[in-house]
Image (spheres, rainbow, N blue to C red):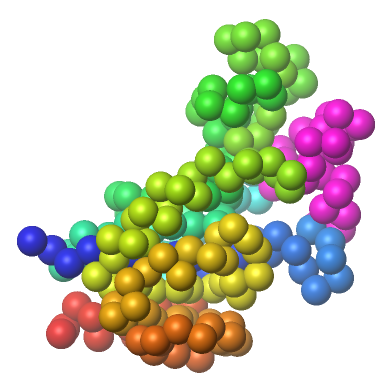
Amino acid sequence: MKKKLVVLTGAGISAESGLKTFRDSDGLWEGYNIEDVATPEAWERNPILVQDFYNQRRKSVLAASPNAAHYALAKLEEKFDVTIITQNIDDLHERAGSANVLHLHGVITRSQSSINPKLTYPIEGWEIGMYEVCELGSPLRAHVVWFGEAVPMIEPAAEICHSADLFILVGSSLAVYPAAGLINYVPRKVHKYIVDPVIPDVSLSGIIKIKAKATEGVPMLVEELLNQ
């Protein structure tokens, strides 16, 4: 039986592939106020603006490539039963070869019904048109969890963390809840590795800190784990 290795990734790992973090230091995302593009109210006020915003983000995601950290995490499957839980809405983990990825906040390469988030669809190309509707006749929008919406995958993610034999946190400041609380579900005795240039303040046992950006720290850690 392979050991269960759970990885939680945040914006830091995708930033090294050229994708802007969800909320930059100026409080904006690609020059937009979060409240104008990432809430249900924004969609009600100006659906054309919101649709265009995510179409452009999707275009950026499709143009980006997985980096050394993504590929290194995929390599862990040679030895471990790996589940990646990601806060990111890109598909870079899948494109790097990871087989088991849970997206907490949705994935931008899919669309969803604007009245039933369980109805999701693949997107051909990078654009969702305002004329496109789901099987219920409701406009399609990006399959992304907005502020003020439920995070339906948080409970499955918590169960996965509770089953971990090893845990790795990469590129997350643990500032966005409920995702930030997932580390608390990892059993106390499990070794927990944190890879980030700025290690978040975590008062838990078993923490092993690797102060480095993802493309440097993750390949180094993966080689160490594969050679143990």
Could you say which is closer to the camera, residue 191 or residue 199? 191
Residue 228 part of the magenta segment = no
Q: Horizontal and vertical percent for residue 82?
A: 27, 60
Magenta segment, which residues?
A: 30-57
Q: Determine the residue positioned at 8% across, 61% down.
A: 1
Q: Is residue 40 magenta?
A: yes
**Which residue: 44% across, 90% down?**
209
**Relative to 8, 88 lies left or right:** right
**76 left or right of 219?**
left
Q: Main secondary structure of the magenta part?
A: helix
**Residue at 46% over, 70% down:** 184
Residue found farthest to the left:
1
Is 41 on the left-hand or right-hand side of 155? Answer: right
Q: Quadrant of residue 131?
A: top right
Residue 65 versus residue 112 in the image, above or below: below
Q: Quadrant of the C terminus?
A: bottom left
Please determine whether, in this image, residue 77 is positioned above or below residue 26: above
